[in-house]
Image (tube, rainbow, N blue to C red):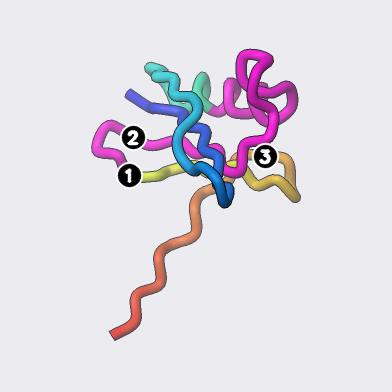
Amino acid sequence: MFTLIAEVVSQSWSGEVARETFATLEDAERQMSRWARFGIDGYCTDVDLLRIVDGTATEIRRWNWRRRKPVAPEPVRRTA
Protein backbone atom coordinates (compact mmCIF):
# COMPACT_ATOMS: atom_id res chain seq x y z
CA MET A 1 0.00 0.00 0.00
CA PHE A 2 1.26 3.46 -0.93
CA THR A 3 -0.17 6.83 0.08
CA LEU A 4 0.22 10.04 -1.92
CA ILE A 5 0.13 13.15 0.25
CA ALA A 6 -0.06 16.83 -0.76
CA GLU A 7 0.94 19.52 1.72
CA VAL A 8 0.87 23.30 1.85
CA VAL A 9 3.28 25.37 3.93
CA SER A 10 2.50 29.05 4.54
CA GLN A 11 2.71 31.67 7.25
CA SER A 12 -1.03 31.53 7.91
CA TRP A 13 -1.65 27.77 7.64
CA SER A 14 0.36 24.61 7.01
CA GLY A 15 -0.78 21.05 6.63
CA GLU A 16 -2.07 18.24 4.51
CA VAL A 17 -4.58 19.18 1.80
CA ALA A 18 -5.05 15.83 0.05
CA ARG A 19 -4.35 12.13 0.53
CA GLU A 20 -4.98 9.14 -1.70
CA THR A 21 -4.02 5.47 -1.26
CA PHE A 22 -2.86 3.11 -4.04
CA ALA A 23 -2.05 -0.58 -4.34
CA THR A 24 1.09 0.02 -6.44
CA LEU A 25 3.88 2.57 -6.45
CA GLU A 26 3.41 3.08 -10.20
CA ASP A 27 -0.23 4.12 -9.71
CA ALA A 28 0.77 6.53 -6.93
CA GLU A 29 3.50 8.07 -9.10
CA ARG A 30 1.07 8.47 -12.00
CA GLN A 31 -1.38 10.37 -9.79
CA MET A 32 1.49 12.40 -8.32
CA SER A 33 2.35 13.58 -11.83
CA ARG A 34 -1.29 14.55 -12.46
CA TRP A 35 -1.51 16.50 -9.20
CA ALA A 36 1.72 18.34 -9.96
CA ARG A 37 0.59 19.31 -13.46
CA PHE A 38 -3.15 19.90 -13.07
CA GLY A 39 -3.79 20.53 -9.39
CA ILE A 40 -5.66 18.47 -6.86
CA ASP A 41 -9.35 18.03 -7.67
CA GLY A 42 -9.41 21.48 -9.24
CA TYR A 43 -9.42 23.35 -5.92
CA CYS A 44 -5.83 23.43 -4.73
CA THR A 45 -3.10 24.12 -7.26
CA ASP A 46 -0.44 25.70 -5.07
CA VAL A 47 0.88 22.77 -3.05
CA ASP A 48 4.40 22.95 -1.69
CA LEU A 49 5.10 19.25 -1.26
CA LEU A 50 3.95 16.05 -2.91
CA ARG A 51 5.24 12.82 -1.43
CA ILE A 52 4.52 9.10 -1.41
CA VAL A 53 4.87 7.05 1.75
CA ASP A 54 4.72 3.27 2.18
CA GLY A 55 2.68 1.28 4.69
CA THR A 56 5.11 2.15 7.50
CA ALA A 57 4.86 5.91 6.73
CA THR A 58 8.40 5.97 5.33
CA GLU A 59 8.74 8.51 2.54
CA ILE A 60 9.82 6.77 -0.66
CA ARG A 61 9.10 9.36 -3.36
CA ARG A 62 9.00 13.15 -3.47
CA TRP A 63 8.03 15.37 -6.40
CA ASN A 64 11.00 17.30 -7.76
CA TRP A 65 9.48 20.54 -9.06
CA ARG A 66 12.60 21.53 -11.01
CA ARG A 67 12.98 18.15 -12.76
CA ARG A 68 9.19 17.68 -13.04
CA LYS A 69 9.18 14.08 -11.90
CA PRO A 70 9.05 11.91 -8.78
CA VAL A 71 12.42 11.19 -7.20
CA ALA A 72 13.69 9.28 -4.19
CA PRO A 73 13.77 11.55 -1.13
CA GLU A 74 17.15 12.72 0.05
CA PRO A 75 18.36 10.91 3.16
CA VAL A 76 18.08 12.81 6.41
CA ARG A 77 21.48 13.99 7.54
CA ARG A 78 22.02 13.49 11.23
CA THR A 79 24.63 15.35 13.20
CA ALA A 80 26.06 14.13 16.46
- The disc placed on residue 54 is 2
Q: Earlier in the sequence, mark 2 or mark 3?
A: 2
* Residue 38 counted in the magenta span: yes
Q: Which residues are magenta?
A: 29-57
Vertical placement of residue 27 versus 76, above or below: above
Residue 33, how many percent across, how many down?
Answer: 65, 28
Q: Earlier in the sequence, mark 1 or mark 3?
A: 1
Q: Name the element at disc 3.
A: strand
Question: Separation of disc 1 and disc 3 at Cα?
Answer: 19 Å
**Nearest the eye: 17 or 23:** 17
**Mark 3 lies on residue:** 69
Q: Are marks 1 and 2 in contact (CB under 8 Å)?
A: yes
Question: Separation of disc 1 and disc 2 at Cα?
Answer: 6 Å
Q: Residues within 10 Å of mark 1 (few under 14, many from 20)?
A: few
**Mark 1 lies on residue:** 58
Q: Amino acid at mark 2?
A: Asp
Residue 59, how many percent across, how many down?
Answer: 39, 44
Q: Amino acid at mark 3?
A: Lys
Left or right, 21 with respect to 50, comes to left
Q: Are marks 2 and 3 in contact (CB under 8 Å)?
A: no
Residue that sits furthest to the bottom in the current view: 80
* Residue 22 counted in the magenta span: no
